[in-house]
Amino acid sequence: MEMTLAIIKPDGVARGLSGEIIGRLEREGINIFALKMIWMTKEQAKGFYKVHAGKPFYESVTDFMSSGPCVVMVLEGKEVINAYRKLMGATDYKEAAKGTIRHDYATDIEKNVVHGSDSPQSAAFEIAYFFNELEIFKR
Ligand code: ATP
Ligand code: MG
């Protein structure tokens, strides 16, 4: 079993898509091990996306990620990192496969509704960035 960090980004929360996105996870049989709403400062958003420091979109995406509340979740399941990335669809919603969250809801390459870790290493960093051990449900 694997864990991954999922975020419903500020555009998704503001547009009232949280229930729909959580429903999709539940229908896919993905377990939610932790869930809360947060509002990152610019500095916290920069720390979260530090792998992208120096890229042309870094300033803009960290402004966006700190522009309003997000829902952050720890998901668990068999190969959940890739399974959830598949559910999200491509970064650019124009390239996202039909039926994916980004295909169905994203409006912009930046405002693309959801985030998901892309490797076990990034999942470990990102989960620890938002959650302490007590907050992660364990059966
Ligand atoms: P995420 O990490 O949010 O799950 P991703 O792994 O599909 O998305 P990354 O390459 O990690 O894509 O980019 C992180 C985020 O930065 C993207 O989700 C998007 O919000 C923003 N972003 C990426 N590329 C661009 C770009 N070319 N222009 C504007 N924003 C971008
Ligand atoms: Mg990424």
Image (tube, helix red, strand yellow):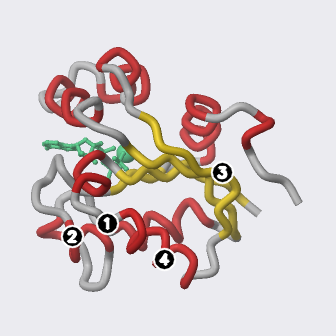
Query: Residue 94's spot in the image, x, y percent?
Result: 12, 69
The circle on residue 44 is none
Write the residue at 21% across / 70% down: 105
Query: Residue 101's spot in the image, x, y percent?
Result: 31, 71
Q: Secondary structure at mark 1?
A: loop
Write the residue at 65% across / 62% down: 32
Q: Secondary structure at mark 4?
A: helix
The circle on residue 17 is 1
The circle on residue 105 is 2
Residues at badges 1 and 3 in contact (C-beta under 8 Å)?
no
| 52 horizontally vs 92: left or right | right
Residue pointed to by mark 3:
34
Q: Earlier in the sequence, mark 1 or mark 3?
A: 1
Write the residue at 38% across / 27% down: 40
| CA distance separating discs 2 and 1 | 9 Å
Q: Secondary structure at mark 3?
A: strand
Q: Residues within 10 Å of mark 1 (few under 14, many from 20)?
A: some
Three-letter amino acid code at disc 3? Ala
Which corner quadrant of the image does residue 42 belong to? top left
Three-letter amino acid code at disc 4? Gly
Residue pointed to by mark 4:
23
Write the residue at 62% across / 46% down: 120
Q: Residues within 10 Å of mark 4 (few under 14, many from 20)?
A: few
Q: Earlier in the sequence, mark 3 or mark 4?
A: 4
User: Is residue 59 positioned above or below 34 on the image?
Assistant: above
Q: Residue placed farthest to the right in the image?
A: 139
